[in-house]
C-alpha cells in the first residue's frame, strides 16, 4: 500500500504518514486506531511504545 | 531536498517577510535621526504592507499551481499551535521590553544610553514595536519549518 493511499484512507497528509514512519511524529489515538483498522491489525502490532 | 506544499508555502512567506520588512527596517533605522519630533512615514509602511500582500498572493498562487494542495491534518494543527506559541513568547518579550523602556523613561531615570534622544521618539518606539511583531512572525515561520523537518 502506498503512503498516499494510507494517508487518504486515514484522513491525514502523506507527509504525516512519512513522519510517523520515520518516528518523527506520534499520532493521536484516533489516527493510530484508524491506521490499525486499515491494516486490520491490533494497535499493539502496528505501534509500540519505546 | 524534498519539500512538502506546506513547507514551500512557509518558506515563501518567510522569504517575503524577510525581504520586504528587512528592507523596510533597514531603510527606517538607517534614516532615523536624533530628533523627538520626527514623524512616522506612514506611506512607506503602507507601501511595505501592500508589497508583501501582493508578493504573497503571487508566490502562494504559483506554489499552489505547481503542487498538489494537501488539506490540514492534526500534525499541521499541532505544529501551527507550537509555532504560534513561540511567536507569542517572542512578542511578549518585545512588549515587556518596550513597557520597561517606557516606564524607565516615564520615571525620569536616565541611564547613559537614554541620553540619546532617539530612544524617546514615538517614531522609534512605534518601529520597535513593529519590529517585534515581525520578529514574532519570523520566529513562528522558522519554528514551523523546524518542526516539519525535525518532528514534533
Image (cartoon, coloured by chain):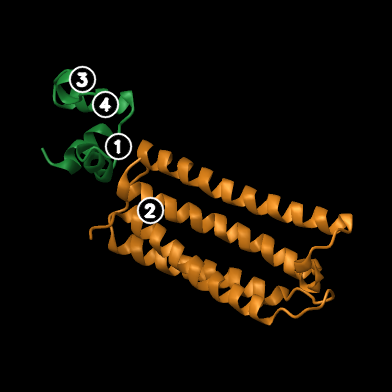
Chain colours: A green, B orange
- From the top left corner, tell me how far across and down residue B2 is, in percent: 23, 58
Instruction: Say whether mark 4 and mark 3 are on the same chain.
Output: yes
B43 with respect to B36 (left or right):
left
Figure quadrant of the C terminus of chain A: top left
B41 with respect to B84 (left or right):
right
Residue B100 seen from this side:
yes
Of labels 3 and 4, earlier in sequence is 4
Q: CA distance from mark 3 to mark 2?
A: 30 Å
* Cβ atoms at labels 3 and 4 below 8 Å apart: yes
* Residue B33 position by quadrant: bottom right
Instruction: Say whether mark 4 and mark 1 are on the same chain.
Output: yes
Say which residue appears at 74% left-offset and 64% top-offset.
B125
Q: Nearer the viewer, mark 1 or mark 4?
A: 1
- Which chain contains the residue that carries disc 3? A
Residue that badge 2 annotates:
B145
Which numbered circle lies on residue A32? 4
Neighbor class of circle 4 (other Cα within 10 Å; few <14, some 14-19, many 20+) is some
- From the top left corner, tell me how far across and down residue B152 is, in percent: 35, 40
| Residue furthest to the front | B112
Of labels 1 and 4, earlier in sequence is 1
Residue that badge 3 annotates:
A43
Q: CA distance from mark 4 to mark 2?
A: 24 Å
- From the top left corner, tell me how far across and down residue A4 is, in percent: 19, 43
* Cβ atoms at labels 1 and 2 below 8 Å apart: no
Say which residue appears at 83% left-offset and 74% top-offset.
B36
SS for dot 1: loop
Q: CA distance from mark 1 to mark 4?
A: 11 Å
Neighbor class of circle 2 (other Cα within 10 Å; few <14, some 14-19, many 20+) is many
Q: CA distance from mark 1 to mark 2?
A: 14 Å
- Which chain contains the residue that carries disc 1? A
Q: CA distance from mark 3 to mark 1?
A: 16 Å
- Which chain contains the residue that carries disc 2? B
Amino acid at each position: 500500500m502506498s503512503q498516499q493511499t494510507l494517508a487518504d484512507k486515514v484522513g491525514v497528509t502523506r507527509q504525516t504518514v512519512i513522519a510517523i514512519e520515520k518516528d518523527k511524529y506520534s499520532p493521536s489515538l484516533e489516527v493510530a486506531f484508524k491506521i490499525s483498522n486499515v491494516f486490520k491489525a491490533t494497535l499493539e502490532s502496528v505501534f509500540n511504545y519505546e | 531536498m524534498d519539500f512538502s506544499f506546506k513547507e514551500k508555502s512557509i518558506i515563501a512567506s518567510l522569504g517575503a517577510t524577510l525581504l520586504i520588512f528587512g528592507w523596510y527596517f533597514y531603510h527606517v533605522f538607517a534614516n532615523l535621526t536624533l530628533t523627538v519630533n520626527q514623524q512616522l512615514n506612514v506611506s512607506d509602511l503602507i507601501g511595505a504592507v501592500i508589497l508583501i500582500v501582493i508578493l504573497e498572493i503571487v508566490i502562494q498562487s504559483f506554489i499552489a499551481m505547481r503542487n498538489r494542495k494537501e488539506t490540514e491534518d492534526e500534525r499541521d494543527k499541532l505544529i501551527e499551535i507550537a509555532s504560534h506559541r513561540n511567536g507569542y513568547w517572542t512578542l511578549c518579550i518585545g512588549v515587556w521590553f518596550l513597557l520597561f523602556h517606557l516606564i524607565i523613561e516615564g520615571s525620569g531615570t536616565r541611564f547613559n544610553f537614554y541620553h540619546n534622544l532617539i530612544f524617546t521618539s514615538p517614531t522609534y518606539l512605534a518601529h520597535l514595536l513593529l519590529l517585534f511583531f515581525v520578529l514574532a512572525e519570523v520566529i513562528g515561520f522558522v519554528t514551523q519549518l523546524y518542526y516539519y523537518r525535525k518532528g514534533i
